[in-house]
Image: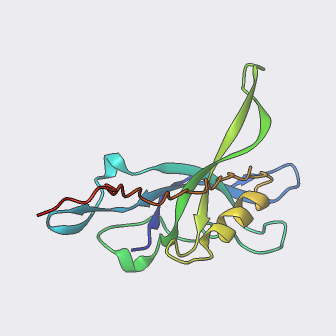
Amino acid sequence: MANFLIKTAESVVKTDKNTRNYKTVTFTEAGFMETPWGLVQKPTAQCVSTSVNCYEKNYLEKMDLGWADPIFNPKNPGAGGIFEGSIEQRNVKPYNITSADGTIRTVDTYKTVVFGNTDSPSYESVVKSAFKSKGQEMLETVVKTVPQVFEQPVIETDPKTVDA
């Protein structure tokens, strides 16, 4: 079953250095877990949230998902604020973050919202594209396959014959 995201908060409209309008929007991943009674939604305390900037007009001159959508209201889910997707965290090329006090630290992981069907075989391509659009180069995880050697079982036979 595909995961979904709900819009749980948004900031006031802000303007970036290129005079583009944006909001900082918080999304929460609402996943499911298997129980003896079937699939049930995870408790809110176990759900992951993250905030991203959503632009009225991004660099492609398109509106980002989440900009105009309402904050999700469980009493009126038909109003919107719910999306297919997940919050993904991956290893990326190391980059520096400067805190408010001027301290610089190097990090090598990045977390962002990825919109799309998480059950799709092409979802990993969507993840890579989302990270690239955020300016983050994902490091490839190399999975080494270890050849399995199956030995033929040794069956020992006694060369002596036993007379009955």
Kindly give the residue lying farthest to the left in the view shown.
Answer: 164
Q: Nearer the viewer, residue 19 or 52?
A: 52
Does residue 134 appear anywhere in the picture? Answer: yes
Q: Quadrant of residue 164?
A: bottom left
> Which colour scheme appears in the figure?
rainbow
Left or right position of 90 against 9: right
Position of the N terminus, as image quadrant, is bottom left
| Residue 89, placed above or below residue 96 | below
| Residue 2, placed above or below residue 22 | below
Left or right position of 155 against 138: left
Spot occupied by residue 94 in the image (x, y as percentages of width and height): 78, 37
| Residue 58, placed above or below residue 131 | below
Q: Count the marks: how many?
A: 0
Q: Quadrant of residue 88?
A: bottom right
Q: Nearer the viewer, residue 82 or 22?
A: 82
Does residue 12 appear anywhere in the picture? Answer: no
Q: Nearer the viewer, residue 103 or 138?
A: 138
Kindly give the residue lying farthest to the right in the view shown.
Answer: 18
Q: Residue at x 65, y 64 (%)?
A: 127
Q: Residue at x 49, y 57 (%)?
A: 151
Kindly give the residue lying farthest to the bottom in the view shown.
Answer: 78
Spot occupied by residue 148 in the image (x, y as percentages of width and height): 55, 57
Q: Residue at x 30, y 57 (%)?
A: 42
Spot occupied by residue 137 in the image (x, y as percentages of width and height): 79, 52
Spot occupied by residue 49 in the image (x, y as percentages of width and height): 48, 50
Q: Nearer the viewer, residue 107 or 79?
A: 107
Q: Residue at x 52, y 62 (%)?
A: 86
Left or right position of 84 against 97: left
